[in-house]
Amino acid sequence: MKKRLLCLLLALALPLGLCACGDTAAGDDAAAAAPSTPEPPPPPEPDPAEVYVDSLTPAQQAAQLFFARCPDVGAVDLAAQYDIGGYILFGRDFEGQTPESVTQTIQSYQDAAATPMLIGVDEEGGTVTRVSAYGAFRPAGRFQSPQALFAAGGLDRITEDTAEKDALLSSLGINVNLAPVCDVSTDPADFIYARAFGQDAAATSDYVRTVVGQMEADGMGMVLKHFPGYGSNADTHTGIAQDDRPLGQFREVDFLPFAAGIEAGAQAVLVCHNIVSCMDDTLPASLSPAVHDILRDELGFDGVVMTDDLVMQAITDYTGDADAAVLAVQAGNDMLISSDFVTQYNAVLAAVEDGTIDADRIRQSAVRVVRWKMQLGLIDG
């Protein structure tokens, strides 16, 4: 009887124990399934270009917007005084010089500048050769035009030539070649034809893509020019040119080589001085917010946008030096090519001080310029 009672009690206790064990397991599962508080995301890394620019004074930020023609005297002192964004060299800077003397001179500019400088040149080949025009720099003679190169060996010859140019310029301390020319021109009567690839938009796009890819591989800064496309217009070095072509033609033809260059990684685009009536029938393209909006929004370009030289007659006929610089910044340019740096720099600085140009507008462009310098390895970033 006692044994039966003990067995009965054990039989009743066993399910209760199992239930208790089951409850514990369920509790453990519930605890494991309870959502944990997520770790907050790490703060975004600061943009090195923004950090660098924020360490500059407002006057230094404004000076970074200038790609100035290198003066024939006092260039070292000017670079030290203003912290200029860069110097563009012309034929006079190479005439009678040697590779060694030019290298030393360029290094003296870099040593004087608080911020490493862009040192640029127009070495397109053919009719525009600032360096190879002098045998001391290229005994074989001037670099050939894109048309001559292509006729001799297609895009492979273009690639070889680009690599040779990049190597020569780099050896001298030049870090930007204002090339390639992206203008579509198939008419030998056009002003721009001799400098262009000389074929249709598709072939010109292939050429631009090839050159940009090689320049990027070589660490050479490049500038696509002359946006939105020169067409058959007259020489803006000597006066105002009016372009009355419809917008559709630009979209179907002229924009294509620029789009190809941008897609290939181009770092800068130069805007011409033509008045392009379908985009802005009043202002030269280089001074037109509407033209810059198309480049930014329609073509998606977020690199450095620069003017052609603001003392070319197309601009001086339109407005004075000082006004041109202020209008250029207001239009959306990040760099101003200037043969009258001191006048135009002071005009921009005064416009910031009186509120005509917002200080953040200057900062935005200075960040783009410094970011380009970081891409070229001139500034750590």
Image (cartoon, rainbow, N blue to C red):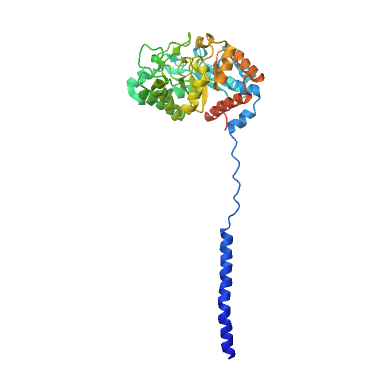
| Residue 22: % across, % down | 56, 69
Where is residue 26? Give x, y as percent: 56, 65
Q: Nearer the viewer, residue 379 or 274?
A: 274
The C terminus lies in quadrant: top right
Q: Quadrant of the N terminus?
A: bottom right
- Apparent side of residue 287 relative to residue 162 in the rendered image (left or right): right
Instruction: Determine whether, in the image, residue 292 is placed left or right of residue 189.
Output: right
Q: Using the rendered image of the protein, determine whether residue 49 is visible from the camera's viewpoint.
A: yes
* Above or below: residue 12 compared with residue 320: below
Asked where in the image residue 126 lies, by quadrant, the reply is top left
The image quadrant of residue 328 is top right
Asked whether, in this view, residue 374 is left or right of residue 123, the answer is: right
Q: Residue at x 33, y 20 (%)?
A: 151
* Res. 267 visible in picture: no
Q: Position of residue 72 (x, y in %)?
A: 56, 11
Please state the horizontal and vertical placement of residue 131, each as a whole percent of the image: 47, 16
**Is residue 5 shown above or below 227?**
below
